[in-house]
Amino acid sequence: MYETVKGLVIREVVFGETDKLIDLLTDTGVRTVRVRGARKPGSKYAAVTQIFSYGEFCLRQSGERLYLDSAVSLSAFYGIRNRLEALALASYFSELVRRTATDQPQPQILRLFLICLHYLSEHTREDLQIKAVFEMRLVTELGMMPDLVCCPVCLRYLPPKPILRLDRADMVCEDCYPGPGWNDLAVTAATLQAVRHAIYSDLERVLAFRVRGDSLWLFAQYAEAYVLRRTEHAYPTLQFYRSITGLDSEN
């Protein structure tokens, strides 16, 4: 039995002497595929099956395992491999997806990953912005979107001093804030608008904006805290990314 899918390699693992296993993120979820001879010198599938390569893959089912029959590269995102920070961030995205993947078709997650890899490769947005957008849009696609339409008390849409509440997954304005909470974050209006764009915009325009300075830093703080709170996992790749970018020293 054969099937052809478009997919993104989000993990590769050594298997045997010359083979490897790859995890493919496809429209129908993550598929684990064995690639025979991929580690032999001169293998024609070495490049297309490397991490963060996007291609068209013909898969063969044999028993309970999938094998690669043929593949064509569609994009390699070479710019990511030129920066350690970008490679580390993409690895964090991969771990996030693998930890939260379901058996249900989720084509939007593949599209989100490809869009963020494009911006990382081209380096046309701040890495922190790409990270925050990926985190917020991923939890949105997983059904864990916060309610940030307006303050639930006074119904104000854009207060000058919004407060984002992690536990309640909502936003309240400073005037209506009932009191300090452990997981509440006072942000700027620009930060609130950035989070809204990440969760509410059309996917194709999810990174079609810029946010800078303190507003970007608060956006990144909130997005990371939100995804950790909702997924309830620890991510070694996140800790590595933070260590090489100096984010740990800013805590």
Image: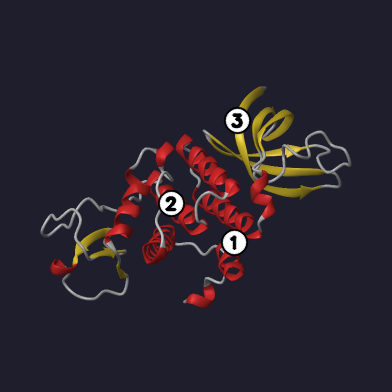
Label 1 sits on what residue type?
Thr
Q: CA distance from mark 2 to mark 1?
A: 17 Å
Label 2 sits on what residue type?
Val
Q: Name the quadrant containing residue 229.
A: bottom left
User: Which comes before the other along the chain, label 3 or label 1?
Assistant: 3
Label 3's element? strand
Percent of width and height locating residue 214: 38, 67
Which one is nearer the viewer's eye here, 62 or 248?
248
Residue 105 visible? The answer is: no
Q: Residue at x 18, y 68 (%)?
A: 174
Percent of width and height locating residue 132: 44, 56
Mark 2, Cα crowd under 10 Å, few <14 / some 14-19 / many 20+, is many
Q: Residue at x 42, y 58 (%)?
A: 227
Q: Residue at x 66, y 56 (%)?
A: 83
Q: Are marks 3 and 1 in contact (CB under 8 Å)?
A: no
User: Which comes before the other along the chain, label 2 or label 1?
Assistant: 2
Label 1's element? helix
Q: CA distance from mark 2 to mark 3?
A: 23 Å
Horizontal side of residue 166 vs 122, given as left or right: left
Residue 211, above or below 181: above
Percent of width and height locating residue 1: 67, 22
